[in-house]
Image (cartoon, grey):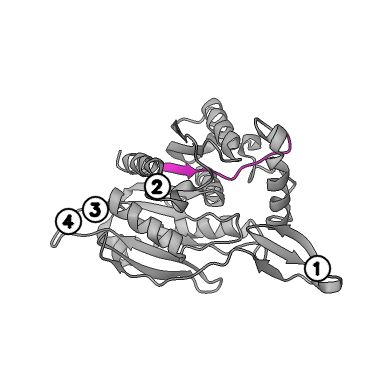
């Protein structure tokens, strides 16, 4: 640690390092790759600007379409993880994952490139993701891939880690506000980033809730703390208004966020929400293992479960 303006005031590997003079260093460096046609899956992708004023954008994915086919596909809005402050919809990790998911599930996908903290503090990422959902409704007759290939009666939200947190909060907002008549069919949460003031389960000994709380204080400085409903949905009085019919929650046995995912599942069932929630745990696995080792047996099982959910 250096003295003066270059002193580190917040160090959170592998995410960010914040200095006294206000500048931010991202410890995890994100590579960006362009959209493309992927010959291994037959999936095409392209980038769109959702809001030119803010720079909000997204990558659209289209599965292989047979010539003269009139088939319409479900629409998946996907929100990437990275602790609210790293990674990208345009990174190799998420580009490869979305190519695979779109091909396996036969869906059109919108992968959201939201603005990241701490330069763009929360709730900006929530607002960007909500704006992306609204953009879909407004572009249904103009954007070629949406107009020609999407069945808007089959709309899903999904995300991993911080992206799962954002997806949940977008679904809450959809249950409390009008979405221009559009309805969300289902929500997929993979290893959601939730926390709380009081430790639960393994947090009693590993103190993970304290680490998550420190990150939360940096990415959302206007928050009331770790029991803010944005980060602790069990404290949200609107939990029962979740704006979808079905939810699928994934946890990993060796993930420090595992107990929070389980608690979310239990509390959602008890909340009075009028829907069906499913749960799946990957034994022996860590956080976002399916992105780190996508060819593993457990990653394959996770993919199969997501595909089934999106096509039911």
Q: Nearer the viewer, mark 1 or mark 2?
A: 1
Disc 4 to disc 3: CB gap under 8 Å: yes
**Is residue 204 toward the left or the right of residue 109 in the image?**
right
Residue interval drawn in magenta: 185-198
Mark 4–mark 3 distance (CA, rounded to whole Å): 7 Å
Looking at this rendering, what residue extends furthest in the left direction? 68
Q: Considering the image in quadrants, where does the C terminus appear? A: top left
Residue at disc 4, secondary structure: loop
Residue ID for mark 1? 20
User: Gap in Å between the C-alphas at discs 1 and 2?
Assistant: 41 Å
The residue lying at 58 percent from left, 58 percent from top is 125
Mark toward the start of the polypeptide (2 vs 4): 4
Q: Residue furthest top?
A: 270
Q: CA distance from mark 2 to mark 4?
A: 21 Å
Dividing the picture into quadrants, the one containing residue 7 is bottom right
Q: Is residue 186 magenta?
A: yes
Residue at the spot of label 3: 72
Decide which of 211, 234 is in the foreground and name it.
211
Task: Provide the secondary structure element on which disc 2 rests.
Answer: strand
Which residue does the numbered mark 2 point to in the structure image? Answer: 156
Q: Are marks 3 and 1 in contact (CB under 8 Å)?
A: no
- Whole-percent x and y of residue 273? 51, 31
> Residue 128 falls in which quadrant of the image?
bottom right
Give neighbour class at mark 2: few <14, some 14-19, many 20+ (Cα, 10 Å): many
Q: With respect to residue 253, does 46 lie above or below?
A: below
Residue 18 in percent (x, y) is at 73, 65
The residue closer to the viewer here, 249 or 145, is 249
Q: CA distance from mark 1 to mark 4?
A: 57 Å
Residue drawn at x 55%, y 44% as measured from the top left: 192
In three-dimensional space, the C-alpha distance between marks 3 and 1, rounded to whole angstroms, equals 52 Å
Which numbered marker is on residue 70?
A: 4
């Amino acid at each position: 640690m250096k003295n003066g303006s270059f002193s580190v005031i917040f160090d959170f590997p592998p995410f960010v390092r914040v200095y006294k003079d206000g500048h931010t260093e991202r410890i995890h460096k994100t590579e960006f790759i362009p959209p493309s046609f992927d010959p291994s899956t037959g999936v095409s992708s392209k980038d769109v600007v959702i809001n030119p004023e803010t720079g909000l954008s997204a990558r659209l994915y289209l599965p292989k379409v047979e010539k003269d086919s009139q088939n319409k596909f479900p629409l998946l809005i996907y929100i990437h993880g990275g602790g609210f402050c790293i990674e990208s919809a345009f990174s190799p990790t998420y580009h490869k994952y979305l190519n695979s998911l779109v091909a396996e599930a036969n869906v059109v996908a919108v992968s959201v490139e939201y603005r990241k903290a701490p330069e763009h503090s929360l709730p900006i990422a929530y607002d960007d993701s909500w704006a992306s959902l609204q953009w879909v409704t407004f572009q249904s007759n103009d954007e070629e891939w949406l107009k020609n290939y999407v069945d808007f009666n089959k709309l899903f939200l999904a995300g991993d880690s911080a992206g799962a947190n954002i997806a949940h909060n977008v679904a809450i907002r959809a249950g409390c506000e009008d979405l221009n008549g559009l309805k969300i069919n289902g929500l997929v949460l993979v290893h959601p980033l939730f926390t709380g003031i009081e430790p639960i389960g393994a947090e009693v000994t590993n103190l993970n809730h304290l680490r998550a709380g420190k990150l939360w204080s940096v990415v959302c400085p206007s928050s009331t703390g770790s029991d803010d409903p944005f980060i602790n949905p069990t404290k949200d009085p609107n939990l029962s208004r979740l704006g979808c019919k079905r939810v699928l929650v994934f946890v990993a046995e060796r993930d420090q966020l595992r107990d929070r995912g389980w608690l979310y599942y239990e509390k959602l069932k008890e909340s009075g929400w009028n829907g069906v929630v499913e749960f799946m745990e990957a034994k022996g696995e860590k956080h976002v293992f399916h992105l780190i080792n996508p060819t593993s047996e457990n990653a394959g099982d996770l993919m199969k479960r997501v595909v089934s959910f999106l096509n039911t």
